[in-house]
Amino acid sequence: MKIGATRVLTALALVTSFSTRAHAVDKLQAVGQASVGFTDNVHSSPDEPVPDVPERSSDLFAVLSPSLVYAILTPSQAQTFKYTFAANLFLQEYKATSFANRLEWLGHFSTSDRTELLLGAGAAQEQPYTSPTLADVGTQTLRAAIPTTNSYLL
């Protein structure tokens, strides 16, 4: 019977988390970042026009990135769980707007006086060019799922 690495890491995180819970200090924290910028090439188009590739265009954009971080600290370990939502919003070229979700886990374990173990895992999902979610309802094309959604395991 094969046991996947993800299941082993999940079991390890749960066992170490519950077994030392009596001496643990934990904290939930909300973190956020926001920035505003300008680009002269929204679609990363080449200098020379290419068929079926949008021409160079400039626009103002905003990047919004709120996160939730949950950390557990014991004398022998520290674990961090983090969820981040990122939105890249364009003012005029709204079709270039994109969204992303990211989950991360980082575990730092003291295995002896001289050794430590650092483990991490993550998953990301991105939805580039998801402008229909911001457009007027009457102009949206109805779909079961956004066909440009990509998911990654890190």
Image: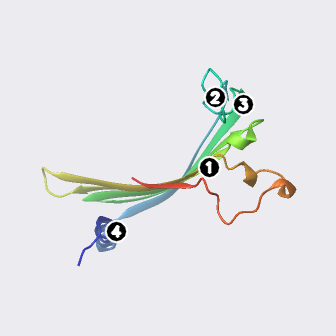
**Kind of element beneath mark 3:** strand
Where is residue 118 shown, x and y percent of the image?
Answer: 26, 52
Count residues near mark 4 (Cα–Cα under 10 Å), then give few for <14, some for 14-19, many for 20+: few
Label 3, on which residue?
60
**Kind of element beneath mark 4:** helix
Q: Mark 2 belongs to which amino acid? A: Val
**Kind of element beneath mark 2:** loop
Query: Could you say which disc has been placed on residue 99 in the image?
Result: 1
State if disc 2 and disc 4 touch (CB < 8 Å). no
Count residues near mark 2 (Cα–Cα under 10 Å), then give few for <14, some for 14-19, many for 20+: few
Q: Mark 3 belongs to which amino acid? A: Leu
Label 2, on which residue?
50
Q: Mark 1 belongs to which amino acid? A: Phe
Q: Residue at x 71, y 27 (%)?
A: 57
State if disc 4 and disc 3 touch (CB < 8 Å). no
CA gap, disc 1 to disc 2?
26 Å
Point out the frontmost of discs 3 and 2: 2
Count residues near mark 1 (Cα–Cα under 10 Å), then give few for <14, some for 14-19, many for 20+: many
Label 4, on which residue?
10
Can you tell which quarter of the image residue 139 is in? bottom right
CA gap, disc 3 to disc 4?
42 Å
**Kind of element beneath mark 1:** strand
Q: Which numbered disc, 1 or 3, marks the residue that appears first in the sequence?
A: 3
Count residues near mark 3 (Cα–Cα under 10 Å), then give few for <14, some for 14-19, many for 20+: some
